[in-house]
Amino acid sequence: MRPALALPLLLVAGPLPAATLDTPGYRVEIIEQCDEGTVGCDNVLYRGTSKKSGNTLELKGRQLMRLCADGITPCHSLGYEFNNGDTHYFVGEDGRLSVTRGDRTLVDQQGEWR
């Protein structure tokens, strides 16, 4: 391969850009740290920033997938889940940010993907 062609190919094959969810109270970046084309990435970074305090939290998590009719093959992404001790974070493909601790809902906000 000629060197002039190698660089553009490396740039295309690099990590995927972050998807950003903007809710009334938070800005959440979701960064899939898996190879392009991976279905059901198990290495996802959550970077959430409070619009009120400016505090940022980073968590590692995974993508949740709905299975196809065969019950085995992943068909559709439902969103992403992350845990911080007993606090559970869910970021839905539909733009919902939900943070729960046990049965208690701490955050439930609808946002827009940017």
Image (cartoon, grey):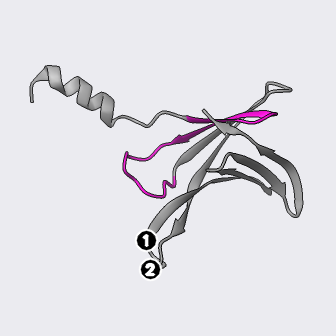
Quarter of the figure with residue 57:
top right
Front-most of residues 26 and 102 = 26
**Which residue is found at the position 56% from the left and 55% from the top?**
63
Residue on which disc 1 sits: 73
Quarter of the figure with residue 9:
top left
Q: Quadrant of the N terminus?
A: top left
Say above or below: 55 vs 59.
Answer: above
Could you tell me the amino acid type at mark 2? Answer: Asp
Quarter of the figure with residue 113:
top right
Could you tell me the amino acid type at mark 1? Answer: Thr
Task: Give the tally of numbered discs.
Answer: 2
Labels 1 and 2 touching (C-beta < 8 A): yes
Element type where label 2 sits in the image: loop
Say above or below: 109 vs 48.
Answer: below
| Residue 104: image location, x then y, percent | 90, 58
Extent of the magenta region: 19-42
Task: Say if the magenta span includes residue 34.
Answer: yes
Residue on which disc 2 sits: 70
